[in-house]
Amino acid sequence: MSDASKFDREFLRAALSLAGKGDVDHFLYISDVPIAPEDLRRQLAKRKLVYAVTSPRIAEELLGSKQRALVIPAYDYSRTERVKVALVSALSQGAFKEGDLVLCMTGKLGRPPDTLMQMRIGGSLDDRLTIEGVKLGDEFNSQVVDALIQLALQVGQEGFEGHPIGTIITIGDHTSVMEKSRQMTINPFQGLSEAERNVLDPKIREAIKNFSVLDGSFVIREDGVVLAAGRYLSASDEMVKIPLGLGARHAAAASITSTTKCIALVVSQTSGAVRLFKGGNIVLELHQTARRT
């Protein structure tokens, strides 16, 4: 932290002191600038330290020096979202487990950390959703799944300009999904570079919320790249069973996930509920406590 002010250094040392407490299991330090060795000397938190950095090169250097490190996307997240992304990455890599108390330190990208949060893994709805996303399997990027679950909940709760809307988002096995679907309208993501249409970028998630008014589904690659919006999912010849009262979107999601290896999120236009399908079955169901009117 060579560019840090005197107060920044005092703040860091106070955070390290808190992280050394017996109740804290991990100290998640979200910054591309490693902590100076003199600041870590004689600190009990040193053995609990986990770095979250945006550069693979920095991560390799930290791992080479026997420190724990993971890589997170370099998008312009809010402080809270940056913590969430780092926690998801740590969970997916087995660095943290349910029940752990994690002290998280973060700040604006490229600036010294200025925010301290304590997080109990599994202690909130967001954490439960993250854990469920991690359980979906190694073929799915847990950061992508988590971001899209949160997005689906926002679409269900907020709608578009006060009007309730529903949508389908497929994730993974994109080649098969594209083969079993057809374009219903102009694809708003066509022509953009992959870097400009990844759902890990908050700006792209905002665009998806706006394009949710289009008929059809979103097709998203395992790594979060949006391939298309406005796709009609072809029904399979196989019979799929969905609970009574669920309509065409849910039937389409059940069908596409039973004939491909993708998963599908469905936002109900009627209730705002979000359901996650895998293998033709609902594996996660989330109901809104309130909807914006």
Image (cartoon, rainbow, N blue to C red):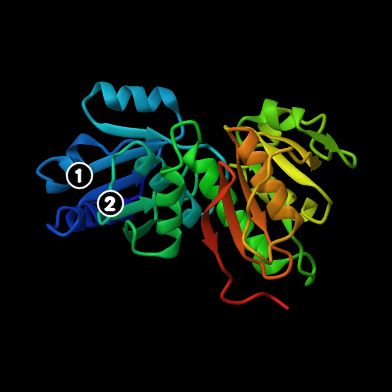
Res. 112 in view: no
Amino acid type at mark 2: Leu
Which amino acid lies under the numbered mark 1 shown in the image of this protein?
A: Lys
* Point 60% across, 34% down: residue: 172
Answer left or right for 169 relative to 215.
left
The one nearer the camera, 82 or 98, is 98
Q: Which mark is residue 48?
A: 1
Residue 17 visible to the viewer? yes
Q: Which tag, 1 or 2, sits closer to the chain's start?
A: 2
Q: Which residue is mark 2?
A: 12
Residue 120, by quadrant, is bottom left
Does 260 sit left or right of 116 as displayed?
A: right
Residue 1 picture location, percent across and down: 33, 40
Snapshot quadrant of residue 121: bottom left
Q: Is residue 117 left or right of residue 203?
A: left
Q: Quadrant of residue 173?
A: top right
